[in-house]
Image (cartoon, rainbow, N blue to C red):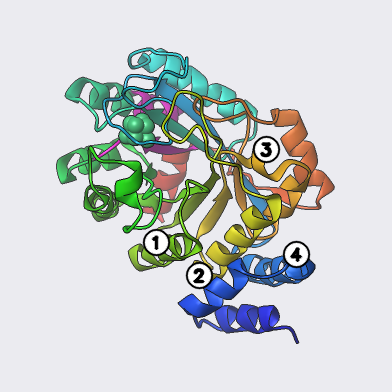
Amino acid sequence: MTKWMNMADTVIAGGQIDQSQAMEVLLSSDDDLLSVLDAAYRVRLHYCGREVRVHILQNAKSGMCRENCAFCSQAIGSYSGVDRYQMQTVEELVDGARQAHEQKAVKYCMVTATRGPSGQEMDTVCEAVRQIKKELPIEICTSLGLLNDDQARELAAAGVHRFNHNLETSRRYFPHVCQTHTYDDRVNTVRAARRAGMEACCGGIMGMGEELQDRIDLAFELRDLEVEAIPVNFMDPRPGTPLSHVERLRPSDCLRALAMFRFVNPRSELRVAGGREVNLRHMQAFALYPANSMFTEGYLTTPGQKHQDDMQMIEDAGFDIAELDPMPVSEHEHSHAAL
Ligand code: SF4
């Protein structure tokens, strides 16, 4: 048995791999790539089955952020020509959810480019969430920047199922990519979301100039935080940003990173996220062996593969598209509560 399968067996039996084993995964050779993916797939299959969870993003407020994250085309001082608009209306947000549902998304994620939500933005999002939950069987995620406990409770009460806030990279490397807020600001937001009863979606970006050890440190930090979902993005350098010059990763390095995240966080919904198409190119479908989740129809400020092509890719690879019950999520919860 290969050492990769031994790692899979350990994790499937409820054990954990250590940091040196995680590094072995990241340093594995191209000749070993299929063996690594095979072992990661055993873990995915055991904990998550063969379904792919499809998510759709809604850029609810674009290009107006005053934070300085170096990778972000919506950051202050970034001149990358992204759309700039204030918070969308309740009707626009609900309409986005209808479209996401038509495209078989299980999760609709409303995102604002901001340090944190204003009172008015909270009101708009919460009202949209209440309307969506009455009408559609779709889970709702929001990503609104830094949150305090009161804001987290308000979102949870409105019906937000999951809150996204990425750590982006390791604690060591974070000050290289952002100086307007701290790593602990981000960790505290993730903790506030979980305290309020929402699931935490929290991941990062590979390929910002970090060391391999930074990727491992992030994976272990997320394990300690017990996050339910991990989006793994691959750097797609945006013109006009401080990281516009970085080189894209090799597809095999993206796949090794996904495998490592699966071994370290075996139960989490692992999402192959932004930068999938341009970094993985012809190897995109291989990402679904470690990852059980993906975005479709592009990202916040960059286009992605079309929905129809994504569905075809999932089907061609032999995976199933995850579905929710046809009943609106709010009714579903009530029926459980009544049991
Ligand atoms: S806080 Fe979010 S939107 Fe603002 S610059 Fe950072 S990543 Fe971009």
The residue type indicated by label 3 comes to Glu
Q: Earlier in the sequence, mark 3 or mark 1?
A: 1
Label disc, if present, on residue 264 of the rendered structure: 2
327 part of magenta stretch: no
Q: Which mark is in front, 3 or 2?
A: 3
Q: Amino acid at mark 1?
A: Leu
Amino acid type for the residue under numbered disc 2: Val
Sequence-first tag of 1 and 2: 1
Residue 85 percent across, percent down from the top left: 37, 12
Q: CA distance from mark 4 to mark 2?
A: 21 Å
Question: Which element is circle 4 on?
Answer: helix
Chain-order first, disc 4 or disc 2 = 4
Question: In the image, 43: left or right of 244?
Answer: right
Question: Mark 2 falls on what kind of element?
Answer: helix
The image shows residue 264 at horizontal and vertical percentages of 50, 70
The residue range painted magenta reads: 128-146
Residue 137, given in percent of the width and then of the height, sits at 52, 36
Q: Is residue 333 above or below residue 7?
A: above
- Of badges 4 and 2, the one in the foreground is 4
Hey, which residue is sitting farthest right in the picture?
Answer: 316
Q: Quadrant of residue 60?
A: top left
Front of the two marks 4 and 1: 4
**CB under 8 Å between callouts 1 and 2?**
yes
Task: Answer with mark 4 or mark 1, whichever residue precedes in sequence.
Answer: 4
Marks 3 and 1 in Cβ contact (< 8 Å): no
Question: Which residue is drawn at the image coordinates 75% and 87% (left, top)?
Answer: 1
